[in-house]
Amino acid sequence: MGAIFDAIHNKLTAAFAPVRLEIEDESSRHAGHAGSREGGESHFNVLIEAEAFAGAPKVARQRMVYRALAEELAGPVHALSVKALAPGEAA
């Protein structure tokens, strides 16, 4: 994986101590579209399961993830799809 993938993984792990974290670089699916760049790492799909999301509404959960990844979203990441779950919730 690349540096941006690693940064996303490390920041989400540090911020949320997830019991499940899946990160998919979907950049190849967006080649030629806005925000696409050579080498990929511009479009990501994240599934994260952590106790920190328990009791929080969906939008609040997404905002928590966006805050943790503010630096990446301000720069190299063009698109980020987030599914944030509390432990035991169905994906």
Image (cartoon, grey):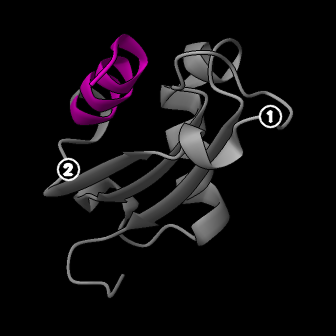
Going by the image, does 52 lie left or right of 28?
Answer: left
Residue closest to the far bottom:
90
In the rendered image, which quarter contains the N terminus?
top left
Give the alpha-carbon distance from disc 2 to disc 1, as whole Å: 33 Å
Residue 73: x and y in percent read: 65, 24
Q: Give residue 32's mark.
A: 1
Residue 63: x and y in percent read: 62, 46
Determine which quarter of the picture holds residue 70.
top right
Q: Which residue is mark 2?
A: 18
Give the SS element for disc 1.
loop
Looking at the rendered image, the disc whose residue lies closer to the viewer, 2 or 1, is: 1
Determine which quarter of the picture holds residue 52.
bottom left
| The magenta segment | 1-13
Going by the image, does 31 lie left or right of 29?
Answer: right
Q: Is residue 5 above or below residue 20?
A: above
- Amino acid at the residue labelled 2: Pro
Indicate which disc, 2 or 1, sits on the residue closer to the N terminus. 2
Residue 13: x and y in percent read: 22, 34
Q: Residue at x 28, y 41 (%)?
A: 16
- Amino acid at the residue labelled 1: Gly
Q: Residue at x 50, y 42 (%)?
A: 65
In the rendered image, which quarter contains the C terminus?
bottom left
Residue closest to the far left:
19
Q: Magenta span has 81?
A: no
Q: Residue at x 33, y 18 (%)?
A: 2
